[in-house]
Image (cartoon, coloured by chain):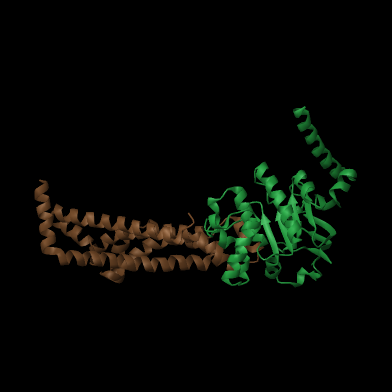
Chain colours: A brown, B green
Amino acid sequence: MNGKWMEVITEYFRTNKDLYLEMVSTHIKISLIALLIATVIGIGGALLVSGNERAQKILSAVFQTFRVVPSLAVLILLIPIMGTGIMPALFALTLLAVPPIFMNTISGLTSASPFTIETAVGMGMTKRGTFWKVKWPLARPMILAGVKTAAIEIVASATLAAKIGAGGLGEIIFTGLGLYRMDLILIGAVSVATLSLMTGLILDGADKLLVPWK
Amino acid sequence: MNAITFTNVSKQFPKTNYKAVKSVSFEIEEGELVTILGSSGCGKTTLLKMVNRLYDPDEGDIVLFGENIRDVDPVVVRRRIGYVIQQSGLFPHMTIEDNISTVPKLLKWDRKKQQERCRNLMELVGLDYEKFHKRYPHELSGGQQQRVGLARALAVNPKIMLMDEPFGAIDAINRLNLQDELKKIHRETNQTILFVTHDINEAFKLGNRVMIMNEGKICRFDTPQNVIRQPGDAFTQSLVQSAMDQEKFWREYRD
């Protein structure tokens, strides 16, 4: 049995190597772009409303609501509006990823202890200086945690993007499901899982680099 | 010249119906180490924080070295004054060296001068530069952190130091050491120090004058000897009495 599986899988890679690599690269590309946009929106949005508690509450509520809608539903709902392909996939994945980054940035920026802030001000830091030299760096670990959550969710959900023709590793899985080809499903699933794990590891590495004081 | 002059200074916080500090006036000469003693809520911290404009008084004038601080940008006032609080308030994301160099950096000293100053300061507060300068605050004990806090406040050799129960959270033995070192530093630098505490022994040991506060007012402001000999009002009397009772308690147990 084992031997047979190995044979089938080796055969797949021998004949479909280029296709496989392309799907991996599409998957990574979609994920990276979505993560980048979500990071800009999430952190930027949080910075814009930092200091305005009302706006923070409203935006948090809005993002939380979006987050509850399953990505697959968003993808399907987008078809009449944006059609199929990469754009609607990017849109749905970004929507999924903004909330954790936004929320974590907000709570990160309020995580500095009041005593730390008091001494910063007491020693003569300006409001701006206190923000960029104290509040912002102390928020980084939480922001990074938010980005990590978002990245892993994106990599996993990007699989669904194949459903609307955006490509990526989902294609192998959906093809496998359609053809009852367990080997394809297995290859797809293991690849996505590996990519997710690697994403987590890379961002853990970034954590060590950006947060040396922990 | 007087280092610090308060004239009829009052402060009431919004949403309260009492004054935290009630029309307080006093003068402190350059080079004095004044301890402010009182129970919590007596206004001692409020009074301290008005000196570096963390709070602004509602009434009255505060003059530092002939300059009314109302007319000076708060940021400028604060950079001239050393400030230490109980919780050390060290920046957890900065190394010990960067923490100590906070104000030199704000004042844009060149790197070499910063580093040299940091080395001297760490020596002054009894911390080995090579061993500690690259560490982060959480890697230090409470006593060591407070030494760093002290070094940081001393960084630009400010003429005035404000200390808000700086040794309050430190165990008894370390506290005594730190008190002795503060006295030594004070002798060497001739800075004017305002030191808030609720520990009567600390207040009388450190201060060359002790300011006793109760309910927003100054009850007594005199040398430790004079206060002990003639406590004056009832509040001061009870304070001195409580310290003596405590001493009696220790003696009884020893004998």
- Identify the residue at horizontal 33%, vertical 66% (top origin): A32
In the picture, the quarter occupied by the N terminus of chain B is: bottom right
Q: Is residue B24 visible?
A: yes
- Identify the residue at horizontal 57%, vertical 70% (top origin): B111
Residue B74: name its quadrant.
bottom right
Residue B117, image x, y percentages: 62, 65
Q: Is residue A146 visible?
A: no
| In this picture, residue A148 sits left or right of residue B190 | left
Residue A122, image x, y percentages: 66, 62
| In this picture, residue A87 sits left or right of residue A187 | right
Residue B221, image x, y percentages: 85, 52
- Identify the residue at horizontal 74%, vertical 64% (top origin): B159
Q: Nearer the viewer, residue A113 or A62?
A: A113
Residue at the farthest top position = B255
Residue A109, image x, y percentages: 52, 60
Q: Is residue A121 above or below residue B226?
A: below
